[in-house]
């Protein structure tokens, strides 16, 4: 019989999609007060070059970036982080007095073997965590880097994303060594 083992902490990040109404300075301040100190940011990409999925709700000229949280934390916090992100998205929409979102905040984490995203949408490859929040393995680490799966979003397959997450994994490994 195998016995449950303690899980290693993971490196959290926030995937951000936003339009021009969002002040990144303000957003960073709010996210740091609610989640943790942000220690690494990806380059900003033009989200519209990947898909038009959010255009009806958020408008055109959308941008994509990822920001990592400094402290390693338990993977058990993913659902909590997603619920908090949803509250913040609603708050930003109300303050901007728009009918749709102006920022999409998707928490996720990585560890030695995978990158996991939170979602409110159920699907065959997603596992329910709690309170209507699901987890999806989006990238797996094999050989020399992260590899996409058949359901991986196009922006997560981009060279810029894969490079960013590889750098984040190096940060994660360094932080793990520092904790021991």
Image (spheres, rainbow, N blue to C red):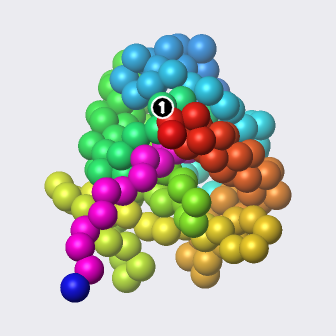
Please report the residue visible at 40 percent of the width from the left and 17 percent of the height from the top.
33
Please report the residue visible at 58 percent of the width from the left and 50 percent of the height from the top.
55
Residue 88 in the figure: left or right of residue 31? left
Q: Looking at the picture, how far across and down is residue 117, in whole percent?
A: 47, 57
The main secondary structure of the magenta stretch is loop
- Callout 1: SS: loop
Please report the residue visible at 57 percent of the width from the left and 66 percent of the height from the top.
113
Q: Residue 59, can we see it?
A: no
Which stretch appears magenta? 2-15
List the residue tagged with mark 1. Answer: 71
Compared with 79, 156 (above or below) is: below
Label 1 neighbour load within 10 Å: few <14, some 14-19, many 20+: some
Residue 91 magenta-highlighted: no
Please report the residue visible at 75 percent of the width from the left and 73 percent of the height from the top.
143
Q: Quadrant of residue 172?
A: top right
Residue 21 in the figure: left or right of residue 63? left
Q: Looking at the picture, how far across and down is residue 26, in whole percent?
A: 53, 14
Q: Looking at the picture, how far across and down is residue 120, in whole percent?
A: 32, 58
């Amino acid at each position: 019989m195998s016995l449950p083992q303690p899980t290693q902490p993971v490196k959290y990040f926030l995937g951000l999609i936003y339009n021009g109404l969002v002040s990144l300075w303000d957003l960073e301040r709010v996210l740091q007060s609610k989640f943790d100190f942000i220690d690494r940011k990806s380059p900003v990409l033009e989200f519209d070059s990947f898909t038009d999925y959010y255009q009806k709700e958020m408008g055109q000229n959308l941008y994509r970036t990822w920001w990592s949280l400094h402290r390693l934390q338990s993977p058990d916090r993913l659902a909590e982080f997603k619920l908090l992100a949803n509250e913040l998205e609603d708050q930003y929409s109300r303050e901007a007095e728009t009918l749709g979102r102006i920022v999409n905040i998707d928490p996720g984490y990585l560890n030695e073997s995978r990158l996991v995203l939170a979602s409110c949408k159920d699907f065959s490859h997603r596992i329910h965590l709690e309170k209507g929040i699901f987890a999806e393995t989006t990238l797996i680490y094999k050989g020399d880097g992260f590899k996409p799966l058949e359901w991986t979003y196009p922006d997560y397959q981009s060279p810029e994303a894969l490079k960013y997450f590889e750098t984040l994994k190096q940060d994660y490994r360094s932080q793990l060594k520092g904790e021991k």
